[in-house]
Image (spheres, helix red, strand yellow):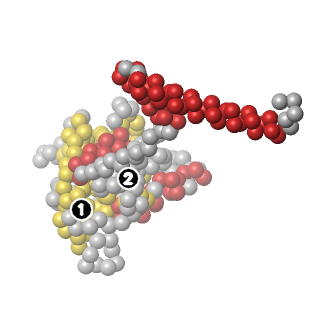
């Protein structure tokens, strides 16, 4: 051994290790063949678990398709839009046959279309000359309100006094609906909110200079929403709908005026039209 070089020593060591490994393998196989079945199974399990830890199994991705039905869309629109709904109470003078005038309380339905507290409602508020207007929110809050525009297109534009910082509102639909489109009317019957479902039954676009006349199979004066959750218009008792395309000009004109007639317009109020008339894309649902 003393006469061997370093290289020869290394090669001799490798040779001895190789022979030892072969001998160990032969002895191990011989012992496993002679060992009882229980011992063999235990050794195999240890080997299998060791391999599983070293080589993990293939990961599988499962894609689940969710079918959204029309009923689901209706439910989502109602849930998202109801917080923007308001009940408007006003006092109207009713004259009887004898010429005696009696103040009577009347209820109307409106919906917020701006974070600044602007409300779109039926023209009945203006035509009946309602006064002492009070707006009740779905969370129980109550605010006084003033008519800031008679609309002129079959709607009334109101603004509450002292609008809260966080206010739910809906967007205005930027297109005209198609014949047969499903619509959702939200309103109040007494103190309870209610819903009516209908469809666009007629579209008269014979006059190219005006917005197409929309007619539905509903007869309420409530706000009407599309399945996307945007305000499509305000209904009338004869089935007509004042389209959102007609409401935008009236709302733009209204929001350019001061909320209270006795006070001068502020820069914020003059610029309110930018925030108060959000137009909803066709596929964008209303904001909750």
- Residue 112, given in percent of the width and then of the height, sits at 39, 47
Instruction: Compare residues 44 and 156 and report the one nearer the observer.
Output: 44
Q: Which residue is mark 1?
A: 181
Residue at 32% x, 67% y is 176
Residue at 75% x, 36% y is 12
Lower sequence index among marks 1 and 2: 1
- Which numbered dot is residue 285? 2
Kindly indicate the quadrant of the structure image that contains residue 212: bottom left
- Residue 254, given in percent of the width and then of the height, sits at 45, 56
In this rendering, would 281 be left or right of 214?
right
Instruction: Compare residues 281 and 170 and report the one nearer the observer.
Output: 281
Secondary structure state at the residue bearing disc 2: loop
In this rendering, would 135 be left or right of 259?
left
Residue at 51% x, 53% y is 275
Q: Is residue 122 visible?
A: no
Kindly indicate the quadrant of the structure image that contains residue 78: top left
Give the CA distance from mark 1 to mark 2. 16 Å
Q: Is residue 284 visible?
A: yes
Q: Residue furthest left?
A: 97
Q: Is residue 200 above or below residue 269?
A: below
Kindly indicate the quadrant of the structure image that contains residue 117: top left
Tell me the crowding category of disc 1: few under 14, some 14 to 19, or many 20 or more residues within 10 angstroms, Cα based. few
Instruction: Compare residues 24 and 86 and report the one nearer the observer.
Output: 24
Residue at 47% x, 46% y is 115
């Amino acid at each position: 051994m003393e006469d061997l070089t370093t290289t020869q020593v290394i090669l001799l060591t490798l040779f001895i290790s190789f022979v030892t490994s072969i001998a160990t393998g032969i002895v191990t196989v011989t012992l496993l063949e002679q060992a009882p079945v229980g011992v063999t199974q235990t050794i195999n399990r240890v080997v299998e678990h060791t391999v599983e830890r070293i080589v993990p199994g293939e990961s599988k991705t499962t894609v689940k398709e969710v079918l959204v039905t029309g009923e689901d869309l209706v439910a989502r629109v109602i849930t998202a839009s109801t917080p923007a709904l308001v009940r408007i109470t006003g006092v109207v003078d009713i004259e009887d046959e004898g010429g005696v005038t009696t103040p009577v309380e009347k209820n109307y339905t409106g919906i917020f279309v701006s974070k600044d507290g602007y409300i779109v409602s039926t023209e009945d508020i203006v035509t009946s000359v309602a006064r002492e207007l009070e707006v009740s929110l779905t969370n129980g809050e109550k605010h006084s309100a003033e008519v800031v525009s008679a609309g002129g297109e079959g709607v009334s534009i109101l603004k509450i006094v002292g609008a809260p910082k966080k206010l739910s509102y809906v967007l205005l639909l930027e297109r005209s609906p198609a014949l047969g489109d499903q619509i959702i009317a939200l309103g109040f019957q007494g103190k309870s909110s209610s819903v009516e479902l209908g469809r666009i039954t007629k579209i008269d676009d014979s006059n190219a200079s005006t917005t197409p006349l929309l007619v539905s199979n509903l007869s309420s004066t409530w706000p009407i929403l599309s399945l996307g959750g945007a305000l499509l218009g305000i209904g009338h008792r004869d089935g007509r709908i004042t389209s959102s395309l007609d409401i935008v000009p009236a709302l733009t004109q209204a929001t350019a005026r001061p909320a209270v007639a006795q006070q001068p317009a502020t820069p914020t109020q003059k610029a309110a039209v930018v925030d108060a008339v959000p137009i909803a894309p066709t596929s964008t649902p209303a904001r909750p």
